[in-house]
Image (spheres, rainbow, N blue to C red):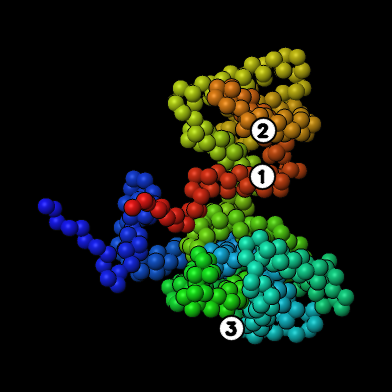
Amino acid sequence: MGEPSAGPAVGADEWVARQAGRREYLPSWLGAAQRADERLGPWSWWAKLAFVGLVALSLPLLGIGPFQIQVGIDTLVLAMLAVGLNICVGWTGLLDLGYIAFFGVGAYGFAVLSSSQINLHWADYFSMPVVMIAAALLGLLVGLPTRRLIGDYLAVVTLFLGQIFGDVVLNDARGVLGGTNGIVGIDPVHGIGTIGSNEGYYYLLLFLLIATMAVLRLLETSRTGRAWRAVREDPLAADSMTIPVTRVRIMAFMFGAMVAALTGSIYASQQISVFPGNFDISVLILVYAALILGGTGSIAGAVTGALVLNIVYDGLLRNPTYSGYIFYGLIVLTLVVKLRPWRRLAAVLGATAVLGVIAHAAVGAVWPAAVAGGPQSGGWIASVIRDWVIVPSSPQTLGRFAFVLLVCLVIGLVQAKGWWRTALLVPTLYVASIAWEAILISPSEVAVTRNIMLGVIVIVIMISRPQGIFGARRVETAT
């Protein structure tokens, strides 16, 4: 007879003990690096934070220009906002769509207290704590009436908070908030020493981001952090385990509001002015995109998502050459990943190339002005596709028709099956190139194109890794 199987161990949670078996790791050497990192223990997180902080600290010393410094400042602001939002959304599971109002309260509060608006000119070590406390109280006021709401209901109610903030700022009857004119002439940070350059604000934001990450890491591993995650997973179960769910949710609102208000005060000081348009829904979308891209529930993921998002959005998509690299690179990467077998990929690429050459030659012979414009992408891509893509000297009209046709082709591509889908993919790729070169990359449409490209990038990454870059996805196994 074989030995009897061991029963459950007394006082041990076997589900927790088997957690490593349910973790999903990246393939090849990336998964091995993840496992090695887990074996290093809790000090690994602090070592990586110190290393990344030193690298970021040295970037201005490399001689980068003013534009790159401003992109770095914008990235740090977005990272701070994403880290603060992670408290509500990632740890507590509260879908807060009014988060941008806390950012605005911090910015406008600092602008009123440290400017000539009402001639206060408080030092930042007075005004910043005041606006952070005011934002925390606002978070308390939001948390109290919404303490029993979850999911979509909470999202709708908090969305009104952002709308109310915008209406209050725009329709300020007493003129304290400046209305549509905003507040200008805001004092620079001048508590211990006056910061008079963007490099100074870069270092200040970097210090505040690292300090905020450190404090939140301690909170994440504390009883409060565990309570937040328990409420996120199951509020009823958390309540049955004597966790004060209402208090925990309100604390999440207040902590997130304080981080957003601190970020807003630095933002107002660096910009020297604030306007209602600085706090609209597009900023909220960027913050949520950064958090989702990096991985909800992860401090490092929130910062990484902001870094990737803002470098692509502000650094690369403003440049036609880099935008072209990203556009065509995403197309080729998607085809390589999704099209199998390889002969199918080769057939699609070959047929697309032949279609472009024939179409360009035929249209050029009949109507030479239709190919007189040339591609608007820069770099070597322009020289490669110059005799392949159709771009007239005045491409706006053709670009609009191509964009509408592209939408129709994409709808048909989704509905088609089998080889019909493969065949329809060829004209879809070619029309996409025409729409891109004719109108999407033009200077007049660059703002819209940046948003479209940003959405495509987020969608592609989320399809390939739904949990985000650093988000953890558990895989349950049947036993």
- SS type, badge 1: helix
Cα separation between marks 3 and 1: 43 Å
- Residue at 51% x, 66% y: name it: 234
Depth check, mark 3 against mark 1: the one in front is 1
Query: Looking at the rendering, which quadrant does residue 235 occupy?
Result: bottom right
Few, some or many residues within 10 Å of mark 3 (<14, 14–19, 20+): few
**Which label belongs to residue 349?**
none
Farthest left residue in view: 1
Disc 2 secondary structure class: helix
Q: Is residue 49 above or below residue 435?
A: below
Q: Indicate the amino acid at tag 1.
A: Ile
Q: In the visual, does 29 lie left or right of 49?
A: left
The numbered mark, 1 or 2, whose residue comes first in the sequence reads 2
Q: Are marks 3 and 1 in contact (CB under 8 Å)?
A: no
Q: Which residue is mark 3?
A: 192
The residue indicated by pointer 1 is 452
Residue 79 placement (x, y as % from top left): 56, 63
Is 121 rendered above or below residue 208? below
Q: Position of residue 277 (x, y in %)?
A: 76, 62
Label 3 is placed on what type of residue? Answer: Ile
Q: Is residue 176 left or right of residue 385?
A: right
Q: Secondary structure at mark 3?
A: loop
The residue indicated by pointer 2 is 411
The residue depicted at 76 percent of the width and 30 percent of the height is 401
Q: Nearer the viewer, residue 437 or 336?
A: 336
Total number of numbered discs in the rendering: 3
Disc with the residue nearer the chain's start (3 vs 1): 3
Identify which amino acid the numbered label 2 is placed on.
Ile
How far is mark 2 from mark 3, CA to CA? Answer: 59 Å
